[in-house]
């Protein structure tokens, strides 16, 4: 076989979780090989193994038919493997050339002088820029470049290291259409140079445009690997989503009340474009989309953490032209953040203090906190939410499920009425997961509205009355329960249109 | 927590542990020791316990008289919540079956203002719904199990013949990985088996104390019902099992 | 689950209670007093010790709000300049014919305004750290003081004003009484009120605090404003004690104050420490200085000792950690 790169039977486990299970992956020289799969399917892990960031538990990597060991990013680099991450990893205050040649600057003779040959560096950088047809001055500081241009600097950096395998993780996520066109031209040029490109993307239309070969990964296994001419987009989506799981979500039908939140034509700094939706009392609205689709930004804007926005926001019929986190809280709007971020909890403080932080006035008189009242309040919520710890336990010592419940507790304590719940069940055990769904049920039963922001599609389909799918800062559609399958959601989330 | 609830809890602990400690109880309920002593005084008058230095021991004679009426009482709140959730699953115009027991009685209490058809083999449930004009109540008839309100036997089975039920709520006495769902008597199982044949959906209802327990007669394995309603205190391994086997597990939380 | 609550409560143990930094400080304080007593026969005289407090308590007023600032993981190095500016404005306005009582109020207002400005700049320009902002205002405030008074002294205050720095009430120095009152107020504010709780929360995790709807900017501004106000209080007592003021007064106070706070066990990474620690360390350093002064030990030697103490204070969390580990090993073996 004329495979330039071959990964054979790669297996990787994190704790007890099998992330990659006997994965085979091959790519030819000068090929653009698209690697696709849902969030958490294992594609990033596979590429991190190739880039030397993770070690596989078993399996071999072959380059040009000979077995290689990749134990560190440095080794990967020496083997000509470069990874371009989704987020830019450049030094913003240095210029293009300095970034391209960082830590391997060309030296003047004699080399022991350690004098950098800047002329050569600038000349070489200029050559690369010319080759790819980019009209940029190699002396230009990176922070004056657009997102797309910064991507090109990363690509030049990779090429200048004589990389012959370049991994691109969602390279078009932050690019404009014009920049994407240039990127594709650059990729075409790279192909001519014989560089193998592994292209991770969710955007199926792009893949159709530039990829030669497609590999679909799901649940740590390769589901499909074939030439791009042999597949259609629907086939890929089917392969990505897998078979529809039987519905296991304890969805409770609740009588809907009056409208609690209405968003009209909301736009924000190019990240959100003309979004409109509304939520009624007792309703669960799901918002989903791939990472970078703007679902999180939307939440942050509505809860006042980012702004100012254009458009109108109505809470219980009252118009808000701008909003702060404090105002949001007073109006019952809250952001139930995910665990594992620093946003949700003060991890070295006890449960009690984490719970009451949102509404200390409730347990204080004249500004003085009443510790016993506070403890009572915390105990009450601990019992109601079945949190397995006492109120003076430090939050850090709790399991993920209990931590998530504490985050719920603190917003219940603040009498939140419209809850934006980010990744409600990510990273928690199944028992707590079932608890969280039932907590959400109880929330809507007792008159709250819930917005679930989740990348777990089966959960979104199972629990939500309506689902809004976002792509590139736009709402691609709002669907009622029962009208939409996981496949449909994936289709719209990958940029498909109705 | 009200004094009566606290006293019931103390009774439960007494049944289980045979003795209680004033200090521990005051910590447990976050009340003063004086309050606990007052509770113990009251329970002593009722004959449940005998006070000792710093605590009390169970009055063994009292158990024979009343075997666990307390726990039934103290679970009323849990059952109420189960009833509330169940009532939300019932839609106007549906025909439902309510099996005998206090949990299903709570369901009945929560649907009094609805317009549904209720089929039951429990006299208490039928009686509970006697004033609800919107509800058509069908009692199966049959043999009354002594000192209960449950109807079983051939007449009951006959009554179920030829009708069709949307949702059957089945109260069970035991839920266990090995023995599956169990109830108190074989006659009851016969009725439920008949109900299974004529129902679109079986929904198992059981408060959390029924888990890891086995009653006399087996109804079926844990896959029998595709929906289960219980309380949040249910053991974690059951939550996991039901989720993994695509059974919708509804648990009660109360925020209001 | 309820049973678990009981266990958690019983877990409170004496060991962890006494292994607090505050107790270390108390111990250190006692040791220093014993050494001082041995070094100088004149040291252990209650009257003289009380008098000694008058010499170092002026800057102690700033220590109180500085504890808040450092718990927020911020810093304010403009306090000494604020002292100078408010003192100078007070002296100049008095000498321009403003009644003394009004001049005092002006002094407090100037300090408060300086602090407010610091806070405002810090929350409005998030890309600037508190060090940079207060470094700038440190230079500016001092500069304004120089412009107002040039390199001169201003004084000739009414006789009653002297009472602030030199007076006694029932044999106890007035300054000590005022300080005690402020200490109690700040102690309550930090440890008992919602405001104090929010300050700790912000110091521990500013993101989570923001996401919990705490008005972080408002609290920051209040804390810096308080610092300015207390700097002005220091200005009042310092000026009273010296009888006159100059634009270069209180120089170096900011470092003394920060040293006392850090020695008091308030972590510069924010969120940790108690006000009592800082108060003990005020007296610790004060008495150390007084005792060594009696023996005519040069001031530079004292600086070395304080420096060493500081390093010790910063090291202690790591030492404590090892101790815990060691304890565990003992238990398992």
Image (cartoon, coloured by chain):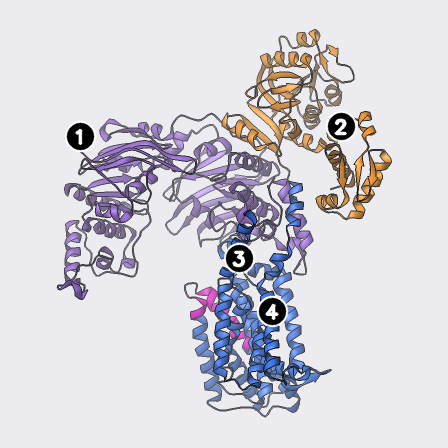
Chain colours: A purple, B orange, C blue
Which one is earlier in the sequence, the residue at label 3 or at label 4? Answer: 4
Q: Nearer the viewer, residue C180 or A273?
A: C180
Q: Nearer the viewer, mark 4 or mark 1?
A: 4
How far from the left and from the top, in percent, is residue A402?
Answer: 55, 42
How far from the left and from the top, in percent, is residue C27?
Answer: 60, 69
Q: Which residues are magenta?
A: C111-132
Q: Nearer the viewer, mark 2 or mark 3?
A: 3
Residue that mark 1 sits on: A1
Q: For marks 3 and 4, give the CA distance.
A: 18 Å
- Residues at badges 2 and 1 in contact (C-beta under 8 Å)? no
Question: With respect to residue C285, does A106 lie above or below?
Answer: above
Residue that mark 4 sits on: C27
Give the residue displayed 49% in from the left and 66% down from the top. Answer: C314
Asked where in the image residue B134 lies, by quadrant, the reply is top right
Quadrant containing the N terminus of chain C is top right
Residue that mark 3 sits on: C323
Q: Chain of mark 1?
A: A
Q: For marks 2 and 4, give the CA distance.
A: 59 Å
Dot 3 alpha-carbon crowd within 10 angstroms: few under 14, some 14 to 19, many 20 or more:
few
Dot 2 alpha-carbon crowd within 10 angstroms: few under 14, some 14 to 19, many 20 or more:
few
């Amino acid at each position: 076989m004329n495979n330039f790169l071959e990964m054979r039977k790669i297996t990787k486990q994190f704790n007890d979780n099998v992330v990659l299970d006997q994965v085979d992956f091959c790519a030819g020289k000068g090929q653009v090989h698209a690697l696709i799969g849902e969030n958490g399917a294992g594609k990033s892990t596979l590429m991190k193994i190739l880039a030397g960031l993770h070690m596989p538990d078993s399996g071999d990597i072959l380059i040009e038919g000979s077995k290689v060991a990749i134990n560190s990013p440095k080794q990967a680099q020496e083997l000509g493997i470069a990874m371009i991450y989704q987020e830019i990893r450049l030094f913003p205050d240095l210029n293009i050339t300095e970034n391209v040649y960082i830590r391997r600057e060309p030296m003047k003779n004699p080399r022991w002088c350690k004098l950098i040959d800047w002329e050569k560096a600038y000349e070489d950088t200029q050559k690369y820029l010319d080759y790819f047809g980019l009209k940029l001055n190699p002396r230009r500081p990176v922070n004056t470049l657009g997102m797309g241009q910064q991507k090109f600097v990363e690509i030049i950096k990779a090429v200048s290291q004589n990389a012959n395998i370049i991994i691109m993780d969602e390279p078009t996520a932050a690019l404009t259409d014009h920049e994407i066109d240039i990127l594709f031209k650059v990729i075409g040029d790279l192909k001519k140079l014989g560089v193998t490109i592994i292209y991770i993307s969710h955007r199926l239309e792009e893949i159709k445009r530039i990829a030669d070969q497609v590999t679909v990964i799901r649940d740590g296994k390769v589901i499909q690997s074939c030439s791009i001419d042999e597949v259609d987009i629907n086939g890929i989506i089917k392969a990505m989503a897998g078979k529809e799981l039987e519905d296991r979500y304890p969805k409770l039908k609740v009588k809907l009340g009056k409208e609690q939140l209405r968003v009209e034509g909301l736009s924000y700094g190019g990240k959100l474009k003309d979004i409109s939706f509304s939520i009624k009392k007792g309703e669960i609205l799901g918002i989903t989309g791939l990472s970078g689709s703007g679902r999180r930004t939307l939440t942050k804007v509505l809860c006042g953490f980012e702004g100012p926005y254009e458009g109108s926001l109505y809470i219980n019929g009252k118009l808000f032209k701008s909003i702060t986190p404090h105002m949001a809280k007073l109006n019952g709007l809250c952001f139930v953040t995910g665990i594992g971020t620093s946003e949700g909890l003060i991890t070295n403080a006890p449960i009690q203090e984490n719970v009451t932080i949102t509404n200390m006035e409730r347990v204080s008189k004249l500004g003085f906190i009443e510790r016993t009242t506070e403890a009572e309040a915390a105990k009450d919520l601990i019992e109601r939410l079945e949190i397995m710890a006492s109120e003076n336990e430090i939050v850090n010592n709790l399991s993920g499920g209990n931590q998530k419940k504490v985050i719920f507790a603190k917003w219940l304590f603040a009498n939140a009425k419209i809850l934006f719940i980010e990744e409600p069940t990510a990273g928690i055990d199944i028992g707590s997961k079932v608890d969280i769904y039932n907590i959400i049920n109880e929330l809507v039963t007792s008159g709250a509205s819930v917005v679930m922001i989740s990348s777990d599609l089966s959960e979104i389909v199972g629990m939500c009355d309506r689902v809004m799918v976002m792509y590139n800062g736009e709402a691609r559609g709002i669907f009622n329960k029962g009208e939409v399958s996981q496949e449909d959601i994936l289709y719209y989330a990958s940029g498909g249109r109705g | 927590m009200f004094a009566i609830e606290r006293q019931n809890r103390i009774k439960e602990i007494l049944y289980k542990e045979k003795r209680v400690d004033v200090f521990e109880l005051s910590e447990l309920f976050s009340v003063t020791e004086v309050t606990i002593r007052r509770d113990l005084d009251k329970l002593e008058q009722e004959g449940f316990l005998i006070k000792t230095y710093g605590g009390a021991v169970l009055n063994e004679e009292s158990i024979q008289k009343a075997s666990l009426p307390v726990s039934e009482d103290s679970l009323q709140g849990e059952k109420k919540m189960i009833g509330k959730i169940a009532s939300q699953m019932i839609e106007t115009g549906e025909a439902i079956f309510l099996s005998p027991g206090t949990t299903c009685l709570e369901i009945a209490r929560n649907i009094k203002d609805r317009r549904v058809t209720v089929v039951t083999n429990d006299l208490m449930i039928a009686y509970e719904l006697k004033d609800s004009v919107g509800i058509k109540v069908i009692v199966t008839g049959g043999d009354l199990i002594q000192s209960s309100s449950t109807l079983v036997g051939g007449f009951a089975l006959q009554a179920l013949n030829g009708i069709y039920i949307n949702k059957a709520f089945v109260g069970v006495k035991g839920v266990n990985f090995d023995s599956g769902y169990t109830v108190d008597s074989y006659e009851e199982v016969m009725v439920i088996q008949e109900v299974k044949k004529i129902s679109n959906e079986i929904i198992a209802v059981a408060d959390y104390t029924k888990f890891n327990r086995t009653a006399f007669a087996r109804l079926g394995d844990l896959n029998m019902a595709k929906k289960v309603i219980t309380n949040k205190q249910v053991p974690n391994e059951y939550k996991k099992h039901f989720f993994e086997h695509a059974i919708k597990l509804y648990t009660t939380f109360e925020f209001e | 689950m309820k049973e678990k609550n009981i266990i958690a409560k019983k877990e409170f143990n004496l060991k962890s209670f006494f292994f607090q930094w505050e107790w270390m400080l108390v111990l250190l304080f006692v040791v220093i007093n014993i050494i001082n007593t041995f070094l100088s026969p004149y040291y252990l005289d209650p009257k003289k010790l009380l008098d000694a407090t008058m010499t170092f308590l002026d800057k102690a007023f700033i220590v109180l709000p500085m504890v808040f600032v450092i718990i927020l993981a911020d810093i304010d190095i403009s306090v000494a300049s604020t002292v100078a500016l408010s003192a100078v404005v007070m002296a100049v306005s008095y000498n321009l014919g403003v009644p003394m009582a009004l001049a005092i109020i002006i002094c407090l207002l100037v300090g408060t305004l300086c602090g407010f400005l610091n806070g405002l700049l810090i929350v409005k320009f998030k890309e600037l750290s508190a060090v940079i902002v207060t470094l700038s205002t440190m230079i500016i405030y001092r500069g304004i003081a120089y412009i107002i008074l040039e390199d001169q002294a201003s004084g000739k205050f009414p006789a009653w004003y002297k009472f602030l720095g030199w007076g006694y009430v029932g044999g106890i120095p007035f300054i000590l009484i005022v300080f005690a009152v402020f200490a109690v107020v700040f102690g309550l504010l930090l440890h008992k009120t919602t405001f104090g709780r929010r300050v700790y929360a912000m110091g521990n995790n500013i993101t989570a605090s923001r996401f919990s709807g705490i008005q972080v900017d408002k609290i920051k501004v209040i804390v810096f404003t308080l610092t300015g106000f207390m700097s002005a209080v220091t200005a009042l007592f310092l000026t009273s004690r010296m009888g006159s003021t100059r634009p270069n007064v209180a120089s170096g106070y900011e470092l003394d104050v920060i040293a006392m706070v850090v020695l008091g066990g308030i972590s510069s990474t924010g969120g940790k420490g108690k006000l009592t620690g800082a108060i003990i360390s005020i007296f610790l350093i004060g008495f150390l200085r007084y005792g060594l002064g009696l023996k005519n030990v040069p001031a530079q030697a004292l600086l070395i000792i304080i420096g060493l103490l500081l390093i010790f204070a910063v090291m202690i969390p790591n030492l404590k950690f090892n101790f815990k580990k060691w304890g565990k090993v003992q238990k398992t073996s």
